[in-house]
Image: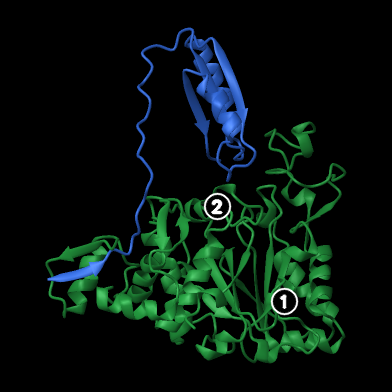
Chain colours: A blue, B green
């Protein structure tokens, strides 16, 4: 039998669940979050067009200060006003 | 509180133990020494800190790097107790500024998660390096030196075990690099030219303090120069190697690291160049013509004027006056050109650029040393 000290360290964060999927997109508000990664804006433009066709009523456009920074509290609060959010994270 | 893990494996069978801990995702694939209570207590003799002291929260997992957890990883890596303060200081340095808590920003979660092939490199500077036999001369970035190998490995294992860095899960580095096993060496102060300041002094520490500096470094590449007879010619060779479009392709100026071989540093010093002269020269000459990168990347500030096709990616942090006819520096200012003398005899040096979102951070080792 081997007994060792756990080299991984504790984690004190509570795990969170993803929000329930929207039943319909009609008349909803969607936050489009641009990570500022190259071409994220192009992806979001296409998504905006697609979601508009599916009946989304309003978009909240959000641009992060930097791709490597977390979303600021103010921008997070803005995103929370939407029914759903799309985050474009990659090239 | 000490958390133990129990495994049904013979405690004397090192191969079986290594395979068991590898299967648990706790190793880098190489054999390890099991961090039993006895061995971790022995490792903790290297510091006076309370083992429960939290040195950092290590991203992206956001695990608590207590002194004991760091010591357990130092045991895994094969460290001696006198190496532990270097590991602690490096973990402190490379977590400074993650989640943007500080202007001195080492964005560890990004460094770990990025597709870039950077690794956390650590460079020591100061009197303790010689005491614990950290190699600064011949072959210092290679294998064969216990302190370099095991301190660097312990740092990487903390990032893996406490920070959760795991290829394909949180670490999306495209091909990775060998620095993700171990990347630790010291400044060669013995061969530093007379008028060149040690790196720690440039960073505001005093001569008697020992420091570590962590940098999110792409694999360095060799600058062979046997022909240059003047400091300016040699500096131009460095500049040419550093002026790569990829360095600034994200629109971010970052830092540049020059690991200058003693023969090259002597050549600079002979012509009267200080470290600061070299930094200034690199800042002004390691520049990339905008038209080389315009097709893919460059748009003028504000995204108003799109040079070609794919806007609007903002070419951040450069002045508005930049046009297609200009060249842009790879760093924001000369202070972001880091010059370290290291290695042994030969006509080469090494250069590299860090992942540009992260900046290097220097931390003193002495506060963590057992007295």
Pointer 2 chain? B
Pointer 1 chain? B
**Apparent side of residue B133 relative to residue B301 in the rendered image (left or right):** left
Spot occupied by residue B180 in the image (x, y as percentages of width and height): 45, 66
Nearest to N terminus: mark 2 or mark 1: 2
Spot occupied by residue A45 in the image (x, y as percentages of width and height): 59, 24
Residue A39 seen by the camera: yes
Q: Measured along the vertical axis of the image, is residue B248 above or below residue B363? A: above
* Residue indicated by mark 2: B98
At 63% across and 42% down in the image, what residue appears? A66
**Residue B71 location, quadrant:** bottom left
Distance Cα–Cα, label 2 vs label 1: 25 Å
**Residue A24 location, quadrant:** top left
Nearest to the observer: residue B56 or residue B175: B56
**Apparent side of residue B9 relative to residue A91 in the rendered image (left or right):** left
At 30% across and 75% down in the image, what residue appears? B32
Q: Measured along the vertical axis of the image, is residue B300 above or below residue B370? A: above
**Apparent side of residue B32 relative to residue B241 in the rendered image (left or right):** left
At 62% across and 55% down in the image, what residue appears? B105
Residue B126, disc: none
Identify the secondary structure beneath mark 1: helix
Identify the secondary structure beneath mark 2: helix
**Residue B351 location, quadrant:** bottom right
How busy is the neighbourhood of tag 2: few (under 14 within 10 Å), some, or many (20 plus)? many
* Residue indicated by mark 1: B201
């Amino acid at each position: 039998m081997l007994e060792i000290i756990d080299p991984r360290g504790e984690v004190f964060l509570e795990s969170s669940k993803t929000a329930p999927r929207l039943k319909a997109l009609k008349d909803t508000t969607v936050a489009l979050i641009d990570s500022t990664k190259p071409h994220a804006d192009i992806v979001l433009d296409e998504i905006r067009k697609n979601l508009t066709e599916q009946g989304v009523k309003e978009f909240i456009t959000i641009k992060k200060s930097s791709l490597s920074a977390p979303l600021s509290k103010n921008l997070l609060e803005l995103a929370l006003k939407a029914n759903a959010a799309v985050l474009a994270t990659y090239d | 509180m000490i958390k133990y893990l129990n495994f049904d494996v013979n405690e004397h069978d090192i191969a079986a133990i290594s395979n068991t801990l590898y299967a648990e995702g706790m190793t880098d694939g190489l054999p390890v020494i099991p961090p039993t209570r006895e061995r971790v207590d022995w490792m903790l003799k290297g510091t006076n800190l309370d083992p429960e002291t939290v040195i950092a929260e290590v991203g992206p997992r956001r695990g608590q790097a207590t002194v004991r957890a760091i010591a357990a990883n130092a045991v895994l890596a094969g460290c001696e107790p006198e190496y532990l303060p270097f590991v602690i200081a490096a973990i402190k340095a490379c977590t400074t500024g993650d989640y943007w808590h500080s202007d001195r920003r080492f964005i560890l979660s990004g460094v770990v998660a990025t597709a870039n092939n950077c690794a956390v490199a650590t460079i020591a500077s100061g009197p303790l390096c010689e005491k614990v036999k950290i190699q600064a001369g011949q072959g210092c970035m290679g294998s064969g030196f216990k302190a370099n190998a095991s301190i660097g490995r312990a740092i990487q294992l903390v990032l893996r075990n406490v920070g959760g860095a795991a290829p394909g899960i949180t670490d999306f580095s495209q091909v990775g690099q060998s620095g993700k096993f171990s990347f630790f060496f010291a400044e060669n102060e013995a061969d530093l030219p007379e008028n060149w300041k040690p790196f720690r002094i440039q960073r505001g520490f005093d001569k008697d303090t020992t420091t570590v500096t962590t940098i999110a470094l792409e694999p360095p590449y060799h600058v062979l120069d046997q022909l240059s007879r003047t400091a300016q010619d040699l500096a131009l060779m460095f500049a040419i190697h550093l002026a790569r479009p990829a360095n600034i392709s994200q629109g971010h100026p970052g830092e540049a690291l020059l690991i200058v071989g003693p023969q090259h540093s002597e050549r600079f010093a002979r012509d009267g160049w200080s470290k600061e002269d070299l930094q200034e020269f690199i800042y002004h000459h390691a520049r990339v013509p905008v038209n080389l990168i315009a097709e893919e990347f460059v748009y003028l500030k504000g995204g108003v004027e799109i040079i070609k096709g794919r806007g609007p990616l903002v070419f951040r942090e450069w002045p508005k006056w930049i046009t297609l006819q200009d060249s842009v520096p790879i760093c924001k200012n000369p202070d972001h050109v880091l010059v370290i003398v290291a290695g042994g005899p030969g006509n080469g040096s090494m250069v590299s650029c860090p992942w540009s979102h992260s900046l290097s951070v220097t931390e003193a080792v002495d506060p963590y040393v057992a007295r």
